[in-house]
Amino acid sequence: MNFARINGVLLHFRVVGPDDAPVVVLANSLGTDARIWDGVISRLAQSYRVVSYDKRGHGLSDIPDSDYSLDDHLDDLFGLVDHLGIERFALGGVSIGGLITQGAALRSPERLTALVICNSAAKSGDHAFWTARMNAVLENGVASIADGIMERWFSTQFRAERTEELAGWRNMFLRCDAKGYAATCATLRDADLRDRVSAITLPTLLIAGEQDLAMPVAQVEATAASIAGSRLEVFPGVGHIPSIEAPEKLADLMLEFFKEAGHG
């Protein structure tokens, strides 16, 4: 396991793949940790140096006090790649990780070669939704919303047929710190990039899940329509975290896209 203190925040990160290969950085979703990418990393790491990390408030990373802003997450991301001596890289993220990907492209496009935005949009939910979610977990813990979250994350077929995996990912969610979770919800409550994403000119691949209850296809489509030249792929029968439900399909698509974008 690898750790680095970035701007005073301890981040847990992992690096897999050849040292001299082009770099891909992956950001995790709300209520998860870097392990959600394992099925994708096993494929990408044959050709790329893959960096994944637990964003603040999650996994083995620190849980700073107070609400987190999108800029906080961007400071963590760029601080980590600077720590690793990485100048340019492709960036992928799911859910809030996809929001971080969009924010990074707006802040420092010269550092990036390609974007993969999974199950994410320029705006997610509204103030009332996220405030209610924050209050629920702070007052009653993450267990109080776990069943509903599993329905939002995973397709009907996954929940019916892959019951042991479902139980394992539910365990991961239950171990998420309520304060870190709520502080990250504040990022989604406050961040709104709808008026800015049209400035993104990098090669961009967006993924949506047909059965994603957390980020409906229409919202991903709206963001794709705002990013000129972007490519949108909808995964049939998949929910909110395609790196878990369809890692081979996602990895193959990413490998194809990175080659088209000239990254590796």
Image (cartoon, grey):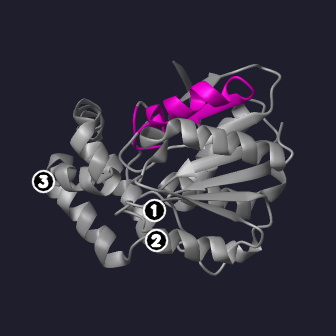
Which numbered circle lies on residue 49? none
Q: Is residue 125 above or below residue 103?
A: below
Q: Name above or below for residue 219 compared with residue 12.
A: below
Query: Disc 1 vs disc 2: Cβ atoms closer than 8 Å?
Result: yes
81 sits left or right of 235 in the view: right
Element type at mark 1 = helix
The circle on residue 140 is 3
Residue 175 rendering spot, x and y as whole percentages: 26, 35
Region rendered in magenta:
33-59
In the image, what residue occupies the spot 16% across and 46% down?
Answer: 143
Q: Quadrant of residue 263?
A: top right
| Element carrying mark 2 | helix
Q: Amino acid at mark 1?
A: Thr
Residue located beneath label 1 in the image = 187
Counting other residues with Cα less than 10 Å from the Cα at mark 2, is it few (<14), some (14-19), or many (20 or more)?
Answer: some
Look at the image and tell me in which quarter the C terminus lies: top right
Quick check: can you spot residue 185? yes
Crowd class of label 3 (few under 14; some 14 to 19; many from 20; radius 10 Å): few
Query: Contact (CB < 8 A) between labels 2 and 3?
Result: no
Residue depicted at 43% across the width and 37% down the height: 33
Q: Is residue 155 magenta?
A: no
> Whole-percent x and y of residue 151?
25, 54
The residue pinned by badge 2 equals 190
Residue 147: x and y in percent read 18, 51
Of label 2 and label 3, which has the lower sequence position? 3
Q: Which amino acid, by three-letter code, is at mark 2?
A: Asp
Mark nearer the N terminus (1 vs 3): 3
Residue at left 63%, top 70%? 224
